[in-house]
Each structure stands twice: as C-alpha cells, then as structure tokens.
Image (cartoon, grey):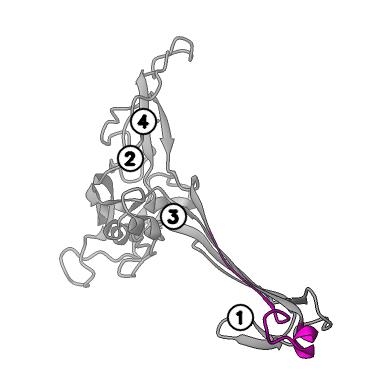
C-alpha cells in the first residue's frame, strides 16, 4: 500500500503521488470486500387448490319402484378439480452502490466537451469497497512473525460522505484568443518518459494541470439492506418463473342395477392457457394440463 495518495501533481514524473496526501493506514493489514457477487435470494410460493364432490343415490328405493328404477339402481358420481401453482423468484445484487449524482460526476472526459462514458451501477467505479484495518502498521516489520493480527471487531458497513478523486473538468478556455486558451490537441511534453522516447510526446488533453484535479467530492451510498427499492436498484440478475397445472376428473359408477354407467352427464373444465376454457360433457373424464412462464433479466 502506498505511503501517499496519488493526488500530487509533478508533471507526470515517476515520483507523481509521493508528494500527495499522506496515507495514515500505510502498512496496515486489512480485510476488504465490495460485496458484488455474494448477495442472492430464492423465494418459492406453492399454492394448491382442490375440490372434491361426491354424490350417491339409489333409484330403486322408496314406494314408487318399477322396472325403470330397478334398471337405474344405485349410482355414484365423484367430481375432482385440482389446481397447482408455483411461483419462484431468484435474484443477485450488489450490497452497496454509489448514487446517480456521483456516477454523473465521474463520467470520463477523454475529449473535452464530449458527454463521456456513463457508468453502470455494477461497474467497479460505482461499487464502493468496505475496508476493516487490523492492527498497527507493519511497514518496518521484517516478517509476518509476531504480527498478532486481531479479529475484526465490527461489521462492514459503508455510509455516505466525501471521497478524494480526480475532477476531469477542463479549466482553460476553449475559445482561441482568450488569455487562458489552451488547445487540447497542442503538443505537451510528458516527463514521465525520457525525452528521447516517442511516448513523451503527448497532447494538452493529457496534461493533468489543465483539469480541476483532485478534490473532495460528495458521494451518496445506496444500501440494498435498507429497503426493497434499493435492492431493486442494485439487482444485476433476476429470474421470475411461474408454472401451473390444472387437473379435473369426473367418473360415474353404478353400484347396483343393470346399467353399467349412469346416464347422468358431468361437465369437466380444463384450462389450456390464459383465457382459454374448454367444456366437455362426459360421464367419465380425467385430464391434466400445464403452463409455465419464465422471465429473466440481467445487467452486465
């Protein structure tokens, strides 16, 4: 870990950053996590509805018995309707994310005046990293022996605040003839490379002195654990699935008498997709149909 933050300006010299803001945590052991790919959930809701109807009648009972009632005998009718629905939701999300205002700020301006790159919420530039430091600095230690690093004593958490970052806003005038005018395409000597190197010949658009430079910038943090709306914002992969099976059966049976099947007719309803119902009069019928739907979204 560097002893200073890279916010010093030395005209591209190799020592750039060494004269920046001192890093108070240089040399300390730490744990870090961006919590980008370890947050997931799976929810399954299963609903079953079942209706059974049973009826029995003996026509050959009572005082008005005749050959026809004896022919009908005792009849039994059973009706069954069953509906199974299963809905599932699986998703993956980032634990934390930077707010939209910060995302607009860090839009890269490779060419002054252009809109720049718009960062997605799950790109590294928009994903803050939580850090827990363990123990004192080990910069002067000759080995890891005797470090005696303690266990973490707090849970990782990130809140809003400010970050020190490079502001790529162009400072000079873009109007030729103005006292502060700088042509972004003009030649600039990049002293990071030896003068004899062709790489040392660059343009003013690469000169950090032409930009506002490092400064403290406010940043808001979106925490997926604080609300369902935040979790929706930080979800990068999700799948919704719904499956439905509808079954009906209506058998008829003669227990006694001379007719093998009852002349009574039963109506079976079977669903065949959204908005479609088919009616079939029958004395005995068992049917089963199924429908399923799946919706998947991802952000990369």
Give the alpha-carbon distance from disc 3 to disc 1, as whole Å: 41 Å
Dividing the picture into quarters, in which one does residue 84 lie? bottom right
- Residue 123, label in figure: 3
124 relative to 205 in the view: left or right: right
117 relative to 174 in the view: left or right: right
Q: Is residue 62 magenta?
A: yes
Quickly name the residue at label 1: 273
Give the alpha-carbon distance from disc 2 to disc 4, as whole Å: 21 Å
Q: Earlier in the sequence, mark 2 or mark 4?
A: 2
Secondary structure found at label 2:
loop
Quickly name the residue at label 2: 6
Residue drawn at the location 34% of the way across and 62% of the way down: 109
Q: Earlier in the sequence, mark 3 or mark 2?
A: 2
Range drawn in magenta: 46-72
Label 4 environment density (alpha carbons within 10 Å; few <14, some 14–19, many ≥20): some
Across and down, in percent, residue 250 comes to 69, 77
Q: Earlier in the sequence, mark 3 or mark 4?
A: 3
Q: Is residue 203 above or below residue 55?
A: above
- Residue 132, label in figure: 4
Q: Earlier in the sequence, mark 1 or mark 2?
A: 2
- Report if residue 187 is visible in the image: no
Dividing the picture into quarters, in which one does residue 203 lie? bottom left
In front: mark 2 or mark 4? 4
């Amino acid at each position: 870990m560097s002893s200073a933050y890279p916010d010093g300006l030395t005209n591209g010299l190799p020592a750039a950053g060494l004269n920046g803001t001192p890093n108070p945590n240089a040399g300390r052991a730490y744990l870090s996590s961006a919590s980008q790919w370890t947050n997931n959930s799976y929810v399954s809701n299963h609903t079953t509805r079942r209706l059974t109807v049973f009826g029995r009648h003996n026509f050959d009972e009572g005082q008005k018995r005749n050959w026809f009632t004896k022919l009908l005998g005792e009849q039994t009718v059973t009706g069954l309707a069953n509906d199974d629905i299963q809905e599932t939701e699986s998703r993956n999300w980032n634990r934390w994310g930077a707010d939209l205002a910060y995302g607009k700020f860090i839009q890269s301006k490779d060419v002054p005046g252009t809109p720049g790159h718009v960062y997605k919420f799950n790109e590294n530039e928009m994903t803050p990293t939580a850090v827990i430091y363990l123990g004192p600095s080990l910069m002067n230690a000759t080995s890891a022996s005797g470090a005696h690093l303690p266990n973490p004593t707090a849970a990782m958490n990130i809140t809003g605040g400010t970050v020190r970052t490079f502001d790529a806003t162009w400072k000079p005038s873009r109007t030729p003839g103005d006292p502060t005018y700088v042509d972004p395409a003009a030649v600039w000597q990049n002293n990071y490379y030896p003068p004899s190197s062709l790489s040392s010949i660059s343009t003013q658009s690469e000169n950090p002195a032409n930009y506002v430079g490092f400064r403290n910038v406010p940043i808001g943090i979106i925490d997926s654990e604080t609300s369902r709306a935040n979790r929706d914002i930080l979800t990068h992969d999700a799948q919704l699935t719904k499956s439905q099976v509808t079954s009906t059966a209506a058998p008829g049976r003669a227990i006694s008498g001379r007719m093998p099947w009852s002349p009574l007719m039963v109506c079976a309803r079977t669903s065949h997709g959204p908005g479609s119902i088919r009616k079939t009069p029958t004395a005995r019928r068992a049917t089963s149909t199924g429908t399923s739907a799946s919706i998947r979204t991802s952000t990369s």
